Image (tube, rainbow, N blue to C red):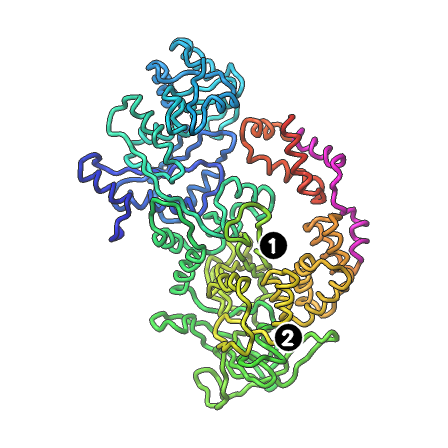
């Protein structure tokens, strides 16, 4: 148990000392309507942690009182999250639905006591009658019904004799209460919907405020720990338990501040929108803040738990910097993962005076003396190095490989440049080099001075792998909607190479790729034929530097003194700096895109040429810094020109095609050399914005999904994204999303 006690543990100790409870029972009660996220991890750690610290028990209970949004797959995801974090619920998972008969009996009891009534006002009238913060509400005329009439109506509601919304059961408390939640709150509502556990047994379902406190009581929970948004609900919690005059001991609710994290959304509605709209690749997408996402990305349970411990338990909401979570995984992995070499953007180096092959004994933990473990690192005449570890015309203080500067290959020899080989377009495709035979690492007697060591792999022995580089899903500190998504949150590199020791290990393993970051073998897509690695986190907080670079002008190269240690980037020369400043200040490009273009002569030339054809700086920059740059890495000769990319950008800006379709068109351009307009016309890819063409698609989707329409009409507004997604899918991605959104919203109003 932690030495410094938070206010919740202090309360638990007070209750034990006073004899209020003999044993501590907490509960983690999620609603199974989505995958758990990092905020749930905090709640899991608090509830299970307190139970563990005081030798009590924590119940895992599904709050399954809303059949329109819940599913068994979410139950399994919640169980998996708790288990993965290292907590145990003693083989029994509780469900609020198990208590439906008992909760209904309690409702009947309240009616008999004159403390609840069946109301027949509609939803709008109930809202109107509730009053405002400044004005008291007024009680429904139906509150005057007799106990006998209320019991009869409640029983008929239970039997399914009424439609959704025709009646509700309400507590009779105080329509003038300062806490508006106490103005005769709803206890039951009619929902003719199939429940994933109880089937069609029930057509009335208890509201959260009624079911939650009673479920706690039935289970013998002592401390019902909730987040702050339920603070006003505590009055209902207490009223229900007190009004029923239940036998003590009874539970009490305590609130703590929920987790808020920058560059992150944790609203289930927004997460569901991302998943259903295919903005991410499922609930376990490594860019999502879900436990499944962190798990697939390669985070460890220890890092998540350490993060939750570090942020503590507070009574006031605050925002946590996501960099703190990244620090926790970095700190955890730094202590225990082996260090190996992977080249993400390979440049071939042929060592002309080296013959044969050898194996070099290289430690997995070069800087941690107590740790043992090494592997055989094959070395041969042809190797790959990172493309940006060589510069033909380097700036001052550049310490990696250049025509005038030798460099050490980590664990191996010192090499020097003999010749630079370029293709017809001036792109460097190979380095001819020589090595110093007596310069082997640990045995160096060459006397050659080098200022840095770079990583490499043997071309003959290395394994081609796919590497997925993840950035933050949102580009702004406090994201609101889809417009705040970071378009560069995922880069897939298919031409990376790792040393053979990486593949010989079990797939479920993490590595530090030297100078690159921490990586994890993807647990879903990894195969021996196609190894896939996810970037967990970089070696340093590179994001903070990126944000800073958009707020402060980058210093001129001569003002910098850069030591090229692991993970650092060479400073810009004066020409690159001038381009960067132009791109960011005049053309309003974001710093990352501007940096990519300014540092690459061929890309900046291509960009300027495209701009002379069509003046759309941001659209063109995004295409060139991503799609064109990727093509240049994979081929020595492009099949398209700057003029054709400008035509593609123009079609995007004019709404002829969507961004998604533009990527498809670009791929076709890269493969065939066809003109973008010709591809769009031949394949019929023009974006559909005409409402008259979209309405039949919408009608078809509505007709094919009557169950989801019913759920939406019953209040499950999360399904809106489902309908939009289905229309976009049925149009082959050609429908204009904004037009579809408006049309679907209008259609659902009148279904």
Q: Residues within 10 Å of mark 1 (few under 14, many from 20)?
A: some
Q: Is residue 298 left or right of residue 631?
A: left
Q: Nearer the viewer, residue 228 or 175?
A: 175
Furthest residue in direction left, as rendered: 18
Asked if residue 387 is among those painted magenta in the image, a careful observer would answer no
The quadrant of the picture occupied by the C terminus is top right
Query: Could you say which quadrant of the image residue 694 lies in?
Result: top right
Instruction: Determine whether 693 is above or below 177 in the image.
Output: below
**Residue 49: percent from the left, percent from the top?**
31, 46
Q: Nearer the viewer, residue 687 or 450?
A: 687
Query: Could you say which quadrant of the image residue 467 lies in?
Result: bottom right
Instruction: Determine whether 7 is above or below 599 in the image.
Output: above
Query: Could you say which quadrant of the image residue 673 lies in?
Result: bottom right
Asked if residue 701 is among those painted magenta in the image, a careful observer would answer yes
Identify the residue shown where x is 45% and y is 13%: 141
Mark 1 or 2: the one toward you: 2
Instruction: Determine whether 125 is above or below 153 in the image.
Output: below
Q: Which residue position holds label 2?
A: 575
> Does residue 528 show up?
no
Q: Which residues are magenta?
A: 675-704
Q: Residues within 10 Å of mark 2 (few under 14, many from 20)?
A: few
Q: Nearer the viewer, residue 445 or 417?
A: 417
Q: Secondary structure at mark 2?
A: helix
* Mark 1 vs 2, N-terminal side: 1
Q: Which residue position holds label 1?
A: 487
Discs 1, 2 touching: Cβ within 8 Å: no
**Residue 181: percent from the left, percent from the top?**
40, 28
């Amino acid at each position: 148990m932690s030495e410094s006690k938070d206010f919740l543990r202090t309360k638990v100790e007070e209750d034990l000392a006073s004899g209020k409870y003999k044993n501590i029972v907490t509960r983690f009660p999620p609603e199974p309507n989505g995958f758990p996220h990092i905020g749930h991890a905090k709640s899991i750690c608090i509830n299970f942690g307190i139970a563990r610290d005081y030798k009590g028990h924590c119940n895992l209970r599904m709050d399954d009182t809303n059949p329109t949004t819940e599913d068994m797959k979410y139950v399994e995801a919640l169980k998996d999250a708790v288990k993965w974090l290292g907590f145990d619920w003693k083989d029994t998972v509780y469900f609020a639905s198990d208590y439906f008969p008992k909760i209904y009996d309690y409702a009947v009891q309240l009616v008999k006591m004159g403390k609840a009534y069946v109301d027949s006002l509609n939803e709008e009238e109930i809202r109107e009658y509730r009053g405002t913060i400044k004005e008291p509400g007024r009680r429904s005329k139906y509150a005057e019904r007799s106990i006998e009439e209320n019991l009869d109506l409640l029983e008929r509601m239970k039997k399914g004799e009424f439609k959704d919304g025709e009646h509700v059961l309400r507590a009779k408390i105080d329509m003038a209460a300062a806490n508006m939640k106490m103005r005769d709150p709803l206890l039951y509502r009619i929902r003719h919907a199939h429940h994933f556990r109880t089937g069609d047994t029930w057509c009335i379902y208890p509201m959260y405020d009624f079911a939650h406190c009673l479920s706690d009581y039935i289970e013998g929970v002592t401390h019902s720990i909730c987040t702050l948004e339920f603070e006003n609900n505590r009055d209902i919690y207490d009223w229900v338990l007190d009004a029923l005059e239940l036998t003590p001991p009874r539970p009490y609710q305590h609130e703590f501040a929920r987790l808020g994290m920058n560059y992150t959304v944790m609203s289930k509605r927004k997460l569901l929108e991302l998943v259903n709209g295919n903005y991410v690749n499922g609930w376990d997408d490594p860019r999502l803040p879900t436990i499944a996402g962190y798990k697939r990305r390669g985070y460890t349970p220890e890092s998540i738990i350490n993060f939750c411990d570090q942020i503590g338990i507070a009574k006031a909401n605050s925002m946590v910097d996501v960099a703190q979570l990244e620090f926790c995984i970095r700190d955890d992995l730094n202590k225990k993962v082996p260090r190996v070499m992977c080249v993400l953007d390979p440049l071939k180096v042929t060592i002309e005076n080296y013959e044969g092959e050898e194996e070099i004994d290289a430690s997995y933990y070069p800087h941690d003396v107590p740790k043992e473990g090494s592997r055989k690192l094959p070395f041969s005449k042809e190797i790959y190095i990172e493309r940006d570890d060589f510069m033909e015309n380097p700036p001052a203080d550049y310490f990696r490989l250049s025509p005038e500067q030798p460099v050490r290959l980590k664990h191996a020899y010192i090499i020097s440049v003999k010749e630079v080989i370029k293709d017809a377009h001036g792109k460097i495709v190979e380095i001819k080099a020589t090595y110093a035979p007596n310069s082997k690492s640990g045995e160096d007697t060459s006397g050659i001075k080098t200022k840095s060591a770079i990583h490499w792999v043997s071309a003959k022995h290395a394994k081609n792998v796919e590497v997925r580089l993840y950035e933050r899903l949102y580009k702004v500190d406090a994201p609101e909607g889809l417009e705040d998504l970071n378009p560069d949150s995922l880069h897939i590199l298919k031409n990376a190479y790792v040393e053979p020791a990486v593949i010989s290990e079990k797939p479920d393993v993490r590595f530090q790729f030297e100078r690159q970051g921490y990586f994890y073998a993807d647990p879903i897509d990894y195969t021996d034929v196609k190894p896939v690695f996810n970037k967990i986190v970089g070696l340093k907080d590179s994001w903070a530097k990126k944000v800073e670079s958009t707020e402060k002008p980058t210093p001129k190269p001569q003002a910098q003194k850069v030591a090229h240690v692991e993970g650092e980037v060479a400073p810009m020369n004066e020409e690159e700096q001038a381009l960067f400043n132009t791109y960011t200040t005049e053309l309003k490009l974001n710093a990352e895109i501007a940096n990519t273009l300014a540092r690459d002569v061929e890309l900046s030339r291509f960009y300027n040429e495209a701009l002379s054809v069509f003046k759309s700086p941001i659209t063109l920059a995004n295409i060139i810094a991503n799609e064109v740059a990727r093509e240049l890495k994979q081929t020595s000769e492009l099949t398209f020109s700057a003029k054709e990319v400008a035509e593609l950008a123009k079609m995007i800006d004019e709404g002829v095609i969507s961004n998604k379709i533009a990527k498809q068109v670009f791929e076709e351009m890269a493969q065939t050399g066809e003109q973008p307009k010709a591809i769009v016309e031949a394949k019929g890819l023009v974006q559909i914005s005409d409402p008259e063409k979209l309405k039949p698609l919408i009608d078809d989707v509505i007709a094919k999904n009557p169950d989801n329409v019913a759920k939406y009409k019953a209040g499950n507004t999360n399904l809106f994204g489902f309908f939009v997604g289905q229309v976009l899918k049925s149009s082959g991605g050609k429908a204009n999303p904004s037009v579809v959104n408006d049309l679907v919203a209008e259609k659902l109003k009148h279904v």
